[in-house]
Image (tube, rainbow, N blue to C red):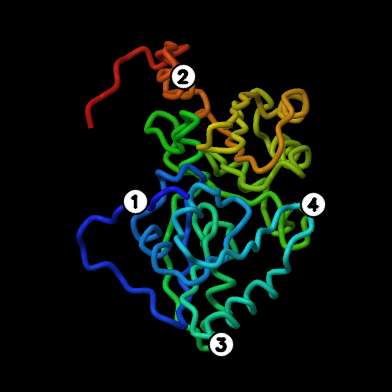
Amino acid sequence: MTDSPTLPPKSWPELQPGWVWLCGAGPGDPGLLTLHALNALQQADVVVYDALVGSDILEWAGGAELIYAGKRGGKPSAKQRDISLHLIELARKGKRVLRLKGGDPFVFGRGGEEAQTLVQHGIPVRIIPGISAGIGGLAYAGIPVTHRDVNQSVTFVTGHDQSGTTPGSLDWEGIARGSQVIVIYMGMKHISHITESLMAAGRSSSEPLAFVTSATLENQKVVESTLGSAVTDAKAEGVEPPAIICIGRSVLMRQVLDWQSMEAGLSPRNLDPLGRGRPAESA
């Protein structure tokens, strides 16, 4: 077991018996865990964790009981209601409960549902945000979700709803018209429908698109494509979930901001991927 990092001196919040802390573990790299999350890990009696929480992070839980409650599309998974009721049961036994979720608990993580159920049953909660894969994972791929020369807005959407199908409530035509950059979570199962819907609504087939799998981890993989070639390229490259999909010109910035390649000694592919022809302005 790896020794847990030492927290810097501070009056850290105390996880009380009978409380549930809903905490984001970040996109995967243990270094992206927040100090509040580390504090929670070091106090918890029981950690109820999701599929995307790595063993490196769980090793910092000390002697806590570890309970797996992961949900993965297309695989046998615990029902959401059962997970929430189990959290209530543990809290009522006087346990100090940490509900540890990949990314951020409130960004397509069902954290809002779990927190609401806990409060309705009289269980006190604390929310600890985490770095979402749609931001941190893309940053590790060298893709900024905002860039002054590309976009002043970004839209985050989920690729499937509670039934596992593409969300019928999403206005793909409106998203296509109004979203300069689109970041899609859990979209691999319906990537064909999503790309076709966006192109039918007017997005160009040549628009840059990137898949990022196993974001921030050692086996991270980035596949650059276009909206029109995404389905073919994903199949050819063996892109598998979990994956973050980014659509928009900000994907082009990877040509100069692929910092992991720089660490490996490789030079940027293009110092002016947006064709600005001028140096960056000072802030």
Q: Which residue was labeled with disc 1?
A: 5
- Earlier residue among tags 3 and 4: 4
Q: Is residue 112 placed above or below 3 in the rendered structure? A: below
Toward the front, the furthest residue is: 1
- CA distance for labels 2 and 1: 28 Å
**Residue in view at x 58 percent, y 31 percent:** 219
Residue 39 falls in image quadrant: bottom left
Q: Which residue was labeled with disc 4?
A: 74
- The circle on residue 261 is 2
Residue type indicated by callout 2: Ser
Q: Which residue was labeled with disc 3?
A: 121
- CA distance for labels 1 and 4: 36 Å
- From the image, state whether disc 1 or disc 4 is nearer to you: 1
Name the element at disc 2: helix
Alpha-carbon neighbours of circle 2 within 10 Å: few (<14), some, or many (≥20)?
Answer: some
Residue type indicated by callout 3: His
- CA distance for labels 3 and 4: 31 Å
Total tally of numbered discs in the picture:
4
- Earlier residue among tags 4 and 2: 4
**Could you say which is closer to the camera, residue 276 or residue 202?**
276
**Residue in view at x 40 percent, y 43 percent:** 31
**Residue in view at x 62 percent, y 75 percent:** 84
Alpha-carbon neighbours of circle 4 within 10 Å: few (<14), some, or many (≥20)?
Answer: few
- Residue 208 in percent (x, y) is at 59, 26
